[in-house]
Image (spheres, rainbow, N blue to C red):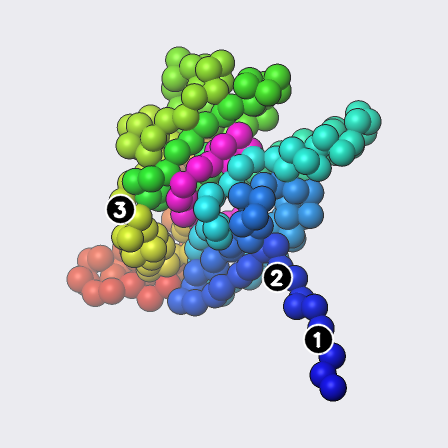
Amino acid sequence: MSIAHAAEPEPILLRQDGDGVATLILNRPGARNALSRELMAALQAELEAIGDDRSVKVVVLAAAGPAFCAGHDLKEVRSQSDEPFFKALFEQCSELMLTITRIPQLVIARVHAMATAAGCQLVASCDLAVASEDARFATPGVNIGLFCSTPMVAISRNVGRKKMMEMLVTGEAIDARTAETLGLVNRVVPADALDAAVAELAGKIVSKSPLTLAIGKQAFYAQLEMPMAEAYGYASAVMTRNMLARDAREGIDAFIARREPVWRGE
């Protein structure tokens, strides 16, 4: 007599590694990968671990199932009614988005189907984004009486003011080509070419000096918030520090000698 055992539930976040690229896959397809507190905690922990892992050069953020990410888990949100829960929820989400910009590796969003509210915020928080032609982006909170205030922080740093406000106050979705025109995504490709396009972009980044990329990523986000004169002073100091790095000397020598550089991340 055999005893049937219930199948172990799949992890809500999957990870695949290869060739210097760590792919993190949101895996709540039945909930359209809504950002529950559990999923955000898992993603936060994985990103922090990757940030300290020198073998990882690029992170790809992908999703399983019929949508990229539907934003916050509204069933979880409505199961609570106290202010401390909501405060903790939005602080947790904000910290996750900031972590994406703070880790030294470049993060690429691989977007298919819908990315709404905090899901659209997730795309905007990534350093780069590649979308399939069927992708749609929206901040529809206004339709349910909840203005997408935290998503607008990241998205408005990608999209111009007038279009951002239109998205926020109408809740209407934009298509992938419009998102590309507005600067929310870098590239739009047919659905069957999405993986190849992401791999191509990731491969180009992996071929660069990881130290140089880490220095540059940190400087990029820091200078965005500075007045122009202050930004130039800061950037000059960054370039001076970069010039003293071994990889910069190697890169210049390789260029002069017309050979491929050998990066050490030093």
Amino acid identity at mark 3: Pro
At 55% across and 59% down in the image, what residue appears?
Answer: 14
In the rendered structure, are the residues bearing label 2 and label 3 in contact, judged by CB atoms less than 8 Å apart? Answer: no
Q: Residues within 10 Å of mark 3 (few under 14, many from 20)?
A: few
- Answer few, some or many: residues within 10 Å of disc 2's Cα (few below 14, many 20 plus, some between 14 and 19): few
| Nearer-the-camera pick, 42 or 75 | 75
Mark 2 secondary-structure assignment: loop
Residue under label 2, please give it: 10
Q: Quadrant of residue 142?
A: top right
Of callouts 2 and 1, the N-terminal one: 1
Asked if 36 appears above or below 153 in the picture, the reply is: below
Q: Which numbered marker is on residue 4?
A: 1
Disc number at residue 190? 3
Residue 136 lies, in percent from the top left, at 39, 33
Label 3 SS: loop
Q: Is residue 211 visible?
A: no
Start-end of magenta stretch: 103-121
The amino acid type of the residue labelled 1 equals: Ala
Q: Determine the CA span between mark 2 and mark 1.
A: 18 Å
The residue mark sitting in front, 1 or 3, is: 1
Q: In the image, is residue 202 part of the stretch drawn in magenta?
A: no
Residue 25 image point, x, y percent: 51, 54
Residue 257 in percent (x, y) is at 19, 63
Q: Earlier in the sequence, mark 1 or mark 3?
A: 1
- Give the image location of residue 234, x and y in percent: 47, 32
Q: In percent of the image, x 55 and y 19: which residue is there?
A: 143
